[in-house]
Image (cartoon, coloured by chain):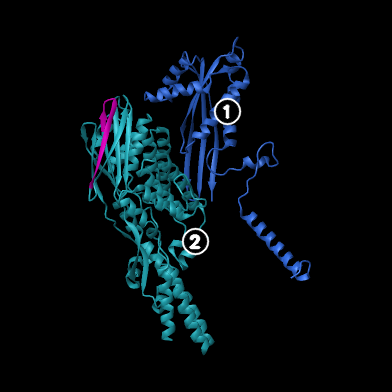
Chain colours: A cyan, B blue
Amino acid sequence: MRCLFRAALLCCAAASAGCATYSDNLLAAHEAAAQRDWPVAEERVNAMLGVDSRAELPETWDSERSLAVLERAVVLQSQGAWKESARDLSEAERELELIDFEVDAVGTIANYVYSGSAQNYRAPPLELFAVNVLNMLNYLAMGDLSGAGVEARRYQVTRDYLDNQGVDRPRGRIGAYLAGFVFERLGESDRALRYYQDVLEETKLQSLAEPVARRAVRPRGGEVLVVIGAGRTPIKVPRRIPVGAAVGIAGTAISGDPRVLQHSVFKVVVYPDLEPVPSQVTGARVRVGDRDAEVELVTDVAADVTSEYEKIKPRIIAAALTRMIARAAVSEGAMAAGRQAGGAGEVVGIVAGLGAEALLTGLDKPDTRSWTFLPGQVWVARAPVAAGAREVVVQLEGSAPSERRVPIQVTDGGYAVVVVTEPR
Amino acid sequence: MAQGSPRFVRRAVAFAALAIVSLSLSTACAPQASRGGAGTARPEMDEAALGVGLDREDINYLVAENLKSLEASKLWTGSIATASSPPTFAIWPIENRTTQHLEDQLVTILSSIETTLVNSGSVRVVARNEQENLIDEIQRQGGSMYDPRTAQRAGRQLGAKYFVTGRITGVDEKLSGVRRLQYSLFLQVLEVETAQVRWQNEVTRSKQLKR
C-alpha cells in the first residue's frame, strides 16, 4: 500500500514538473531586454508566436498568442517600430475582445477540475486600458493625430464599459493625460480639459498647470511632449501555501465543502501570486534643445498592478481551493466505490483515487499569465518650444543607465511627441 | 509476388484507398477560398457582417443615401443641374471621429462620392491627386485639414466653386456580451466663395456584436 501511495505522489511530481508557465516562456525575451537587445527579445517572442518576423501575425489565435502579440507590441515600440506595434495592439485587442465575448463553458468547467491556465485569458482592467494608452503613443509618435484620436475614444469606451460593469477602474492617469493632449490638439478643448481634471484629481502635475490655465485651447507656439515608459511590472509566479492558510484568505469565496480536503493527501494549495521584478530604470532626465525639462512620474504601473491584484487575491486563492476540492471529491468517489466492492476492489479503489488526484494535481497549473512587458512606470516631460529643429535627449537612470537622442521638428502651433519605451 | 495476382490486386486497391482517404482529409483541412458578391453564384456573401467595422455594404448605403439627398436638394435641382456650365467640385477629406481606424474605408467613401458626382454629368470634379498634394502641403505647415477655413482656402486654390466635406462619427457602447456601434456619415457642400453651407445631410447605420 505504501508503495502505491509513493507511486501516486511521484506521478504527481513528474506531471507538475513537466510544463513551463507563460512567464517561463518569456524569460529569454526579458533577459535580452535587460541587455537592451530588443531585436533578440523580439525574436524570442516571435518564436512563441510561431512566426519568423514582425511582419507576420500568428495564423491561429488563442489566449496565449493574443497576449504574446501584446508583448511583441511593446518590444516593437521600444525599437520605434510604431506602425507594426500599432497593428499588433489593434489585432490583439480585437482577439481579446472576441475571447471576452465567448461563453467559455469548457474553460470554466476545466478551471474547477484542472487548471486556471486552461481557461481563456481575460485581460484585467489595467491591461485593457494599457492597450489604448500604448497605441495612443504609437500614433502620436507617428504624428497621426486622427489615429491617436481613435485610440483616445476607445480608451473612453473601455472606461464606460468598466463603469457600467461596476468594476473598480484602475487609476488612469497616463491614459487621461494622453487623451487630454490628443483632444486638445484636435481642438476639442472642453473634452481635453475634462481629462486633465481627471488626472489632477489623482495627482498634482506641474506640466498640466499651463494647459489647464489656457483651458486646453491649442497653444500658438510649438510644444514638445516626451513620454517615457520604463521599468518592470510584477509577474505572476506559482506559490504554495498550506490549505488552512488558503481557506483563511479565501473565506466565503470558496465553492464546495472544504471538509473534503481533510482526506486529501495534498496539504498545500498552489495559486498565482505576484512577484516584484527589480527594474533597471528608476528615473529619467530630459533635455529639449539646450534646456532641461522637468520630468514627472505620472503613473506607477507596477504599484497599480499590485493594487489591482490584491483586490482579487482572495478570489484567486478561492478558485485554486475550489479546484482542489473538486479533485479531492473525484478521489473520494473512487475510494468509496472501491470500499463498496470490498476485497481486492478496495485496494484498486484506493490506488485509482490516489492516482486520479495525483494526476489532476499534476495537471493543475496556476494561471501565471499577464502582460509582462508592460512598463513599470510612466514619466512625462512637456515643454513649450519655438518653431524649428532641435534634439531631445532622454537619459534613463538606474542600475543600467542609457541615453536616447531623438531629432524633432516643430512648427508654430505644432507639436512633437517623443516616446521612449524600455520595459527592463 | 507477380503482378495481377489476387494478393497484389488487394494490396494495390488498399494502397489506392488509403491515398484517396489521405488526400480527401488533407483537402478538408486546408482553408478554402471562394468568390462572392454581385455577378457570382453567391451574391449574398457580402451581406453578412463580420464585425462592428464599416464594410462595403455599409459604405454603399451611407454614401448612396447621402447623395440621393444631395440630388434631391434645392442646391442640385435649382443651381447645379440648371447651370450653364457644370460647376467644379472639390472633395475634401472626411474626418474620422469614431472609435475605429477607418483609413481604408475613408478612401472608399471618397472614391464613391467622386464616382457618383463624376457620373452625374452635372458637375466637374477636381482630380484627387491635385488635392492630395495640397493636403500634404497643409499638413507639412502644421495646419488642420479639417478646419473649414483651410478647406475654403484650398478650394480657392483648386479653382472649385463648391467643396464636399464631412465627418463620420460613431457612438460606441459595450456591455457584457454586447458591443454596438452607431455610425453617422455627415456630408455637407460648402460654397467656396462665401463659405456658406449649401447642403448637408446625415445617414446612420448600426453594427452590433452579440454573444
Q: Crowding at label 1, few (<14), some or many (≥20) Cα neighbours within 10 Å?
A: some
- Residue A387 figure quarter: top left
Front residue of this view, candidates B134 and A302 = B134
Return the residue at label 1. B112
Residue that mark 2 sits on: A107
Q: In the drawing, does residue B33 fall left or right of residue B148?
A: right
Q: Is residue B155 above or below residue A241?
A: above
**Distance between the alpha carbons at the discs numbered 1 and 2:** 46 Å
Helix, strand or loop: magenta stretch: strand
- The residue under the point 45% across, 42% down is A87
Residue B64 appears at what percent x and percent y? 60, 29
Q: Looking at the picture, how far across and down is residue A292, in whole percent?
A: 20, 35
- Number of callouts in the render? 2
1 or 2: mark nearer the eye: 1
Discs 1 and 2 share one subunit: no
Say if A133 sits above or below A365 in the image: above
Q: Which secondary structure, mark 2?
A: helix
Q: Which residues are magenta?
A: A383-397
Left or right: A18, with B60 as reference point: left
Q: Does residue A386 show up magenta in the picture?
A: yes
At which x and y percent is residue B11?
72, 67
